[in-house]
Image (tube, rainbow, N blue to C red):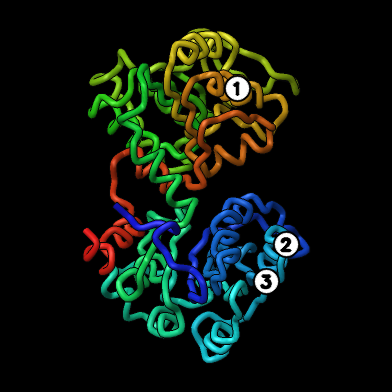
Amino acid sequence: MIDTLDDLDVEGTTVGVRVDVNSPIADDGSLADDARLRAHVDTLSDLLERGGRVVVLAHQGRPGGDDFVSLEPHAERLSILLERPVDYVDATFSDAARTAVEDLENGGCLVLENTRFYSEEYMEFEPERAATTHLVEGLAPVLDAYVNDAFAAAHRSQPSLVGFPSVLPSYAGRVMEAELDVLGTIEETARPRVYVLGGAKVSDSLDVAWSVLEKDLADHVLTAGVVGNVFLIADGVDLGDSSSDFIYDQGYWDEIDRAADLLDAHGERIALPRDVAVARNGERTEIGVNALPPGNDEAAMDVGDSTLAYYQRILTDAETVILNGPAGVYEDDKFEKGTRQLYGTATEAPTSIVGGGDTASALRRLGVEGFTHVSTGGGAALKMLTAEPLPAVTALRESPQQTAND
């Protein structure tokens, strides 16, 4: 068990809340998408309405990237979303930051600066060591409690995620609570249970496939996107130089052997694309995988109608569908069909769960709705689906007050 906001006496309490609002940044420095901020509104509103003094910690981008920017725009957007003033300070654990925290009144909210502006935050530590970093030692004395709502970053072991639970009473926020309730109980969902694995994160998808098939969690695994292309090559299909070169350039060539081993071990439960869509003379053209011409140099950009019909028959009979990764290059209108139709069919299942990350972005772009649960985390969701422990969740579970309660 992990304590939640329902276990926290909020009134007059100064609460550090770790969120994941890592967002696309427009050319003018503003937020291009506030979906991740909106995900945390329930947690922040709950604490503020109950008289808490809320201190928001978050990261944005990676050092050297165009999106490695201040959190000032995030604070401005949160003011709108929360319908109340949200302060911002360009510091994280300095005297200026601590003073700003101490000046908060009940119901007040403060956003601290990008945690990754501080070098130790870009490193990973065991919780006990993370508790001795400058961030935790500098900020913890002015906090009464810590809430982790950053499920999307829960597979990291950085100070702001695992250090505070060692020294403060710690709780799961609403996002974290919902994610653990759903993704932590996949094995309890109704069967047939179908996994749809697409996108370009081949290594992660193969990890999921191995795990759910070995543990008999999946009745079917449907493959698409680059993941599907890797399986096709593993099955002896010549996709041509363009698709093969992309897989090689992305460092996934060795994954073909893993995919072949999976097919040998569990091929009866793994579905491969029957046709692919390519760009020919600027138009979408569909070709059966066994009819690809020798020396074909047209990249497989999506699954075709034959594959869609095949996969949709499986999805229609499913009680639970878990989806991760788009079916093709959905950003191009000619190749959005596979993603739109497969995911649209999945919404008709009694339980439909989307693994977050790029998949959630694709569905927002395509306007596909109606899922039982859309995760906020890509990498974290994948780790949960393979039963891998998440460092930030383990830190919450093993915090001193939680251990005492247990």
| SS category of the residue bearing label 2 | loop
User: Which residue has dot 1 on it?
Assistant: 344
Q: CA distance from mark 1 to mark 3?
A: 38 Å
| SS category of the residue bearing label 3 | loop
Q: In this view of the protein, can residue 34 be seen by the observer?
A: yes
Which residue: 29% across, 58% down? 397
Which residue: 60% across, 52% down? 36
- Disc 1 or 3, which lies upstream in sequence? 3
- Disc 2 or 1, which lies upstream in sequence? 2
Position in image of residue 4 (x %, y %): 40, 56
- At label 1, the amino acid type is Gly
- At label 2, the amino acid type is Glu
User: Which residue has dot 3 on it?
Assistant: 86
Q: Residues within 10 Å of mark 2 (few under 14, many from 20)?
A: few
The one nearer the camera, 222 or 252, is 222
- At label 3, the amino acid type is Val
Position in image of residue 117 (x %, y %): 53, 75
Q: CA distance from mark 3 to mark 2?
A: 9 Å
Position in image of residue 348 (x %, y %): 55, 19
* Residue 69 falls left or right of residue 47: right
Q: CA distance from mark 2 to mark 1?
A: 34 Å
* Residue 86 falls left or right of residue 403: right
Which residue: 65% across, 29% down? 368
User: Which residue has dot 2 on it?
Assistant: 83
Say if mark 2 contacts mark 1, CB within 8 Å.
no
Mark 2 vs mark 1, foreground winner is 2
The one nearer the camera, 247 or 165, is 165
Q: Residues within 10 Å of mark 3 (few under 14, many from 20)?
A: many
